[in-house]
Amino acid sequence: MTKMIAASRHVLSNYATFSGRASRPEIWWWFLTVLIVLIVTEIIDATVIAPALGVDAANRARPLSWLVSLAIILPNLAVGARRLHDTGRSAWWLLIGLVPIIGTLTLLYFYIQPSDPERNAFGAPNPLRA
């Protein structure tokens, strides 16, 4: 749990920092944190907000989930860019994620690659190595 908190704090403290590097544990702990937060906000939207707005379950409003998603767009892009830097790639590779299915799978492949400290021109390694 402490690693998840440390990774989340590091990502949020570098909210829109696209330079530097991010380790594999940092990005995966961040993604797990985002998944948990989004599940919790969906539950709150379904059980509290939708009934308060008088919307049925099939067409329920999701304002809290939308706000959280909007708030974490930049940190998600930034940690993805830093992870690509850690593997020796440019952050421009994030644009391949716009290609349906293939782009997402390609980014996933890049994210699981080990760090490349010898050929890396993107700065010092991340202190959150695990």
Image (tube, helix red, strand yellow):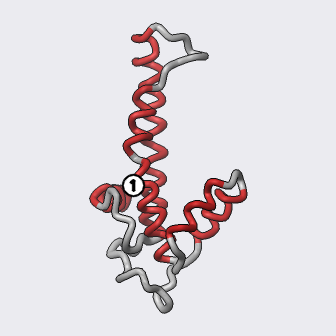
Q: Nearer the viewer, residue 12 or 74?
A: 74
> Which residue is at a point 47% across and 75% down the rendered structure image?
85
Above or below residue 72? Residue 116 is below
Above or below residue 4? Residue 59 is above
Image position, residue 14 (x, y; %) = 31, 61
Q: Nearer the viewer, residue 35 or 79?
A: 79
The part of the image, by quadrant, that contains residue 95 is bottom right
- Which quadrant of the rendered structure holds the C terminus? bottom left
Q: Is residue 18 left or right of residue 118?
A: left
Q: Residue furthest bottom?
A: 118
Pointer 1 residue: 75
What amino acid is labelled 1 in the image?
Pro
Image position, residue 105 (x, y; %) = 67, 60
Above or below residue 83? Residue 114 is below
Can residue 6 be seen by looking at this rendering? Answer: no
- Which quadrant of the rendered structure holds the N terminus? bottom left
